[in-house]
Image (cartoon, coloured by chain):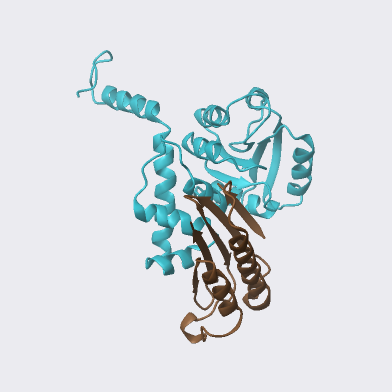
Amino acid sequence: MHSQFHDLSDRLPEDVEQALTNAVSEALTNVTKHAGTDEAWLTAVGGDGGVTLKVVDRGRGFRPEAVNPGRGLLRELRHCVVEVGGRVAIDSAPDQGTMVEVSWRR
Amino acid sequence: MAAMIEIGAIDNDQMLLEGMSAWMSRLPDITLTALAVSVDEFLAATRRPRIVILDLNLENFTDPADNVRRLVAVGHTVVVVSVIPDPVYIAATTEAGASAYVLKANNLGVLADVIRQVAAGETPMTTEHAFWLGRDARPERPHLSAREREVLVSYGSGCTVEAVGRVLGIAPGTVRTYLDRIKEKYARAGRPIEHRVQFLDRAREDGFGRGRLPPK
């Protein structure tokens, strides 16, 4: 895993921290299980009282519109982040990898 | 067989130099022929390969951007490497004319690929380089357009040029053009003096007198 972190001095509320950490580990689990690659990029950027985390892989990807949003890991991931007031964006295409962006602002 | 790429390395970490040297010796196309612990030592050597791998922090109180500038001034192509990614120095060495930045946490294969690219005259941008340029908050940083910033941030998060292009609705080739342009903006910001010298050179070529100031 390649990781880069910047400007993470702000302490987040405990439930937010927990939700974001869960989401990132779900996203990484997703890479291991489905992306067909053993490489992933994790970036975390803070500032403005918030944080943006991205998990990116260069694996096989998927067609987002073909995946039922109510199912599986993606739903779990989205659910726990939205519950604490965060946002999730997922972008993917066949053979072009997947990007999961999780962000939270105060 | 392709021509052998000859490189030098400047790093205060003796163990790393030896390890890199041993690893490089197994490559069929890259050969490490000059090792030095400082820019002074490197520049004093008789054998100075054009391409140089330079550690960002030589721990000898020298300024990383000055180190790059001194090497570039005498015609070297500089690939900066570092253990700790310091955003200010990464930006400053890019402005000083470094051709690429590689994080030492990467495996040596990444470094070898970057060396091959610069040897071929390309201007590779690593994911880490894009990430840290995207975090450049120095007041004197070069101005990037909104689209250039989007490309930098997206590519810096680990996306391939194809994925960046798809997300932003532009061709992968255009993404590469943006990345090249960003690096060029940095390099330009770092050489106002060179610009003036070139201007005077051109003025001289054009037949202006030596003492004559360029027209405003």
Residue B86 place in picture, x, y as percent:
59, 40
- In the picture, measured across the screen, residue B138 lies left or right of residue A36, that is left
Q: Which chain is cyan?
A: B
Q: In this view of the protein, can residue B184 be seen by the observer?
A: yes
Residue B109 place in picture, x, y as percent:
68, 54
A103 or B200: which is nearer to us?
A: A103
Residue B165 place in picture, x, y as percent:
42, 65
B69 or A58: which is nearer to us?
A: A58
- In the picture, measured across the screen, residue B141 lies left or right of residue B12, that is left
* Residue occupying image coordinates x 43% and y 50%: B180
Number of numbered discs on residues: 0
Q: In which quarter of the image is the N terminus of chain B?
A: bottom right
Chain A color in figure = brown
Does B63 sit above or below residue B168? Answer: above
Q: In which quarter of the image is the C terminus of chain B?
A: top left
* Residue occupying image coordinates x 68% and y 50%: B105
Corner quadrant of residue B90:
top right
* Residue occupying image coordinates x 50% and y 66%: A85
Residue B97 place in picture, x, y as percent:
49, 36
Does B104 sit above or below residue B147? Answer: above
B181 or A19: which is nearer to us?
A: A19
Does B189 sit above or below residue A41? Answer: above
Q: In this view of the protein, can residue B125 be seen by the observer?
A: no
Residue reaching furthest to the left: B216
